[in-house]
Image: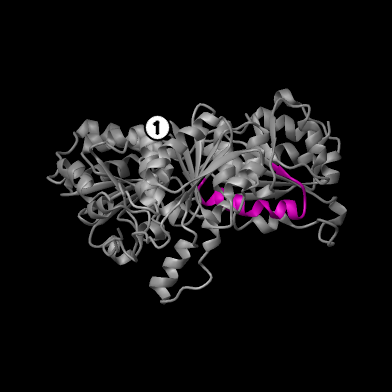
Amino acid sequence: MKVAEIVVKILEKEGIVDAFGIPGAGINPVYKALGDSPIRHYCVRHEEAAVHAADGYYRASGRMAVALCTSGPGATNFVTGIYTANVDSIPLLAITGQAVTAQLGKDAFQCVDIAKICEPVAKATFCVTDPAAIAGVMQKAFLLARSGKPGAVLVDLPLDVQMAEVEFDADSYQPLAYENPRPNPKEIEQAIAMLRAAKSPALIMGGGVLLAGAAKQCVEFAELMQLPVITTYMAKGGIPDNHPLNAGHAGIQVGQPIGNKVLLESDLIIGIGCRFTDRHTGNIAVYKGNRKFIHINVEPREIGKIFQPDLGIVSDAKYALNALLETAKAVGGRKADARVADIPAQKQSLKRKTCYECVPIKPHRVYEELNNFFQDNAMFTTGCGLNQIWSGQLQAINQPGLYMPSGGAGTLGYDIPAAFGAKIARPDKHAVAVMGDFGFTFHAQELAVAAAYHVPLIVVIVNNACLSLIRQNQKYAYNFEYAVEMEVNQGVMDYVKVAEGFAAAGERVERPEDIRAALERAVKSKKPYIIDIVCEKETDCSMGPAIDSIKEFI
């Protein structure tokens, strides 16, 4: 059997049912085999978008997808997508074509060492030069993508390797089994003892909890131990927004006043499936304070990477939470400290204002309308900029798998293709890309893909005619503004015509009371639809250098 056929057979055996990519001369043997496969293929308009689509697909469904492209610039266009997925621990397989093995390292046409290029930004990379090794490489690639701290894996296939004939029995192929680490029982007992001894402990739910499918257990544990639950940005939706223990986000950008307040008032933090990265912690000295930390993570290298916790536990989040629940039930939970009952009231009193009636529209109002209109019926993607930070601060998400940001990378252009992939994975939910006017131009061509496949995603553009996150940074960090104004984005630029040119539809909204009706028309259109919302240009976003010094703007 040809290696190209083996690759596709293995994709089927590993459970792949959807693929995103662009065919090309360097990958055509695989595409020939893909044409005879039940795997559905969606041809995107840019290679990076294929990876973002596979990324959004997994975030929405928990099922892996594959991204494919040809060699050279096709492969290098994969890099940003691979980095975006990998830094957020999203498992996916990226397959690239390559020149024949005899041309490797000789500057042949469209011959680039993509495996080497992607090494720093992928979980693993392989360039297959021995045709007989293909089954083992593919097994290992899927194993690495899924196990431990998940991530993106690249497999590069030279053209002659794709065409080589090797022995392969598809019926005998089996995915490699794996077992993520389980916690040390003594360490679990120590964690419970520390929590019971603390006066004002809190729990940080990280994205790893959602990836492990353990949000329910995490909330149950918090309820048993009466712990306020602070969610990282990547864990948004892990606990219902109106849950009495939901203490919101902590952080210097996407953080919320309630989350930062609760963390600062805590004497012990148990962080599960989180990484303590810079946008969450801000100034480490302030963040750490005099409080103790318990850190649980599936990846040993994450524990102590930012700061050394008082107790580190290497474990899959679900296994750790099951063990914590079992031990806590055996010894008894803890009584709530005085502040716990007050969380809902404080959360409400500290909530940032969104009900603005002004024209031009205050950006905050956009998120209020999204919350009120979609409730729990939509999946949201967002990439980077003040629009993304406002989204994290102001959107209310009540279920895992409904909020899919580019967290660690902050990738402009992620939004639309990721929403496309999410909608393919979960057609029962609306897919909404929330983005800025500048970010819209990065991969707007993917609207054509959505239109071609009749996928009715919705794009909400928070149009403030400015590189607003960069403007704010220039203004407050360096006392200047340059090259950030984009007045034309509210003037001669017509994003509705862009959408119509790609066989989509859309409209511009200039008054806050008209946003809901525009959302209704978008849903009823049954086609890709953009809503270009003209917003106030100079609105700043609440943020700061440390969680105790956030500058609030209204």
Q: Which x, y percent locates residue 300?
A: 45, 51
Residue sitting farthest toward the left: 338
Residue depicted at 64% across the width and 54% down the height: 79
Q: How is the image coloured?
A: one colour
Q: Is residue 549 above or below residue 56?
A: below
Q: Which x, y percent locates residue 85?
A: 56, 48
Residue 75 visible in the picture: yes
Q: Mark 1 Cα within 10 Å, few/some/many (few <14, many 20+)?
A: some
Would you say residue 69 sits in the magenta stretch? yes
For residue 317, which quarter of the picture? top left
For residue 130, which quarter of the picture? top right
| Image-based side of 331 in relation to 36, left or right | left
Q: Which x, y percent locates residue 99?
A: 83, 51
| Image-based side of 187 in relation to 448, left or right | left
**Viewer-proximal residue, 182 or 337?**
337
What secondary structure is found at the residue carrying circle 1? Answer: loop
Residue 272 visible in the picture: no
Would you say residue 72 sits in the magenta stretch? yes
Residue depicted at 58% across the width and 46% down the height: 496
The magenta-colored residue range is 68-89
**Viewer-proximal residue, 106 or 349?**
349
Q: Is residue 166 above or below residue 153?
A: above
Of the 4 image quadrants, the one containing the N terminus is top right
Q: Is residue 122 above or below residue 66?
A: below
Q: Which x, y percent locates residue 275?
A: 41, 53
Residue depicted at 43% across the width and 68% down the height: 473
For residue 139, which quarter of the picture? top right
| Location of mark 1 (residue) | 376
Residue sitting farthest toward the top: 171
Q: Amino acid at mark 1?
A: Asp
